[in-house]
């Protein structure tokens, strides 16, 4: 079960599609979060719903008690954030007219797109027309950003581990691509480097897929 479409419409219009915690304009990249989780008896009602951006959603939902840094969001605090933002939207809508609307995708969402690109790239290299696709370096800038911004720390240990598995392989495929590119295009050494690259690309596919699935699953609305 989830919130009804008309409740969501109402809420997203009232909050101007901005996150109730950080006030960022989200456009379509907004989640409607259960203040009290359904598993804990929370209802699918307007009262129990709060629109938040992906990054705040990750912080609220998946505070990891095994890494107890900072302070966890409580349902009571979320209700206060929602109330404050509702008051600003209602009483002083003029502040919204000039407020920036830059949409930042956030590093966890960025990592999903990056993993999708890498998966597509290794699938092409592992395919029959690999000659058309080898040599393109795999990307890791969103992973680095997630580490730098601390969003990786928000994730449960098993998801961090699957992401590490994927990026370890991604680094390895880049190394194999470099050695392939540095061998003369003939002879045994070239053949060996080719096989290593193709096997490395094939071997990375399940690892990248697992990381992508686990991150997608983690970020889905609840
Ligand atoms: Zn936010």
Image: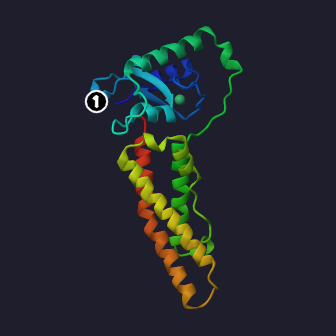
- Image coords of residue 56 (percent x, y): 49, 31
Colour mapping? rainbow
- Say if 71 sits above or below 120 in the image: above
Residue at the farthest right position: 98
Residue 217 or 181: which is nearer the viewer?
A: 181
- Say if 112 sits above or below 219 in the image: below
Residue at (45, 15) in percent of width and height: 80
Which quadrant does the C terminus fall into?
Answer: top left
- Image coords of residue 37 (percent x, y): 33, 27
Ligand 1 within 8 Å of disc 1? The answer is: no
Residue at (59, 32) in percent of width and height: 27
Residue 97 or 68: which is nearer the viewer?
A: 68
Residue at (57, 46) in percent of width and height: 145
- Image coords of residue 148 (percent x, y): 55, 44
- Give the residue pinned by disc 1: 39
Residue at the farthest top position: 91
Label 1 SS? helix
Residue at (37, 37) in percent of width and height: 64
Residue at the farthest front position: 69
């Amino acid at each position: 079960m989830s919130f009804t479409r008309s409740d969501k419409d109402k809420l997203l219009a009232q909050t101007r599609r901005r996150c109730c915690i950080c006030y960022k304009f989200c456009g379509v990249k907004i989640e409607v979060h259960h203040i009290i989780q359904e598993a804990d008896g929370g209802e699918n009602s307007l009262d129990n719903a709060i629109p938040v951006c992906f990054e705040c959603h990750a912080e609220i939902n998946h505070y990891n008690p095994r890494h107890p840094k900072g302070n966890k969001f409580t349902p009571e605090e979320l209700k206060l954030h929602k109330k404050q933002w509702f008051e600003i939207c209602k009483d002083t809508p003029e502040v919204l007219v000039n407020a920036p609307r830059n949409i930042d995708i956030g590093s966890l969402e960025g990592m999903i797109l990056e993993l999708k690109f890498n998966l597509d790239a290794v699938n092409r290299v592992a395919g029959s027309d690999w000659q058309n696709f080898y040599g393109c370096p795999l990307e890791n800038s969103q992973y680095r950003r997630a580490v730098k911004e601390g969003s990786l720390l928000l994730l449960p240990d098993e998801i961090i581990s699957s992401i590490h598995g994927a990026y370890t392989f991604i680094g390895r495929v880049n190394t194999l691509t470099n050695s392939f590119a540095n061998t003369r295009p003939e002879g045994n050494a070239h053949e060996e480097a080719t096989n290593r690259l193709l096997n490395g690309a094939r071997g990375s596919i399940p690892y990248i897929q697992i990381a992508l699935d686990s991150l997608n699953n983690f970020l889905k609305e609840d």
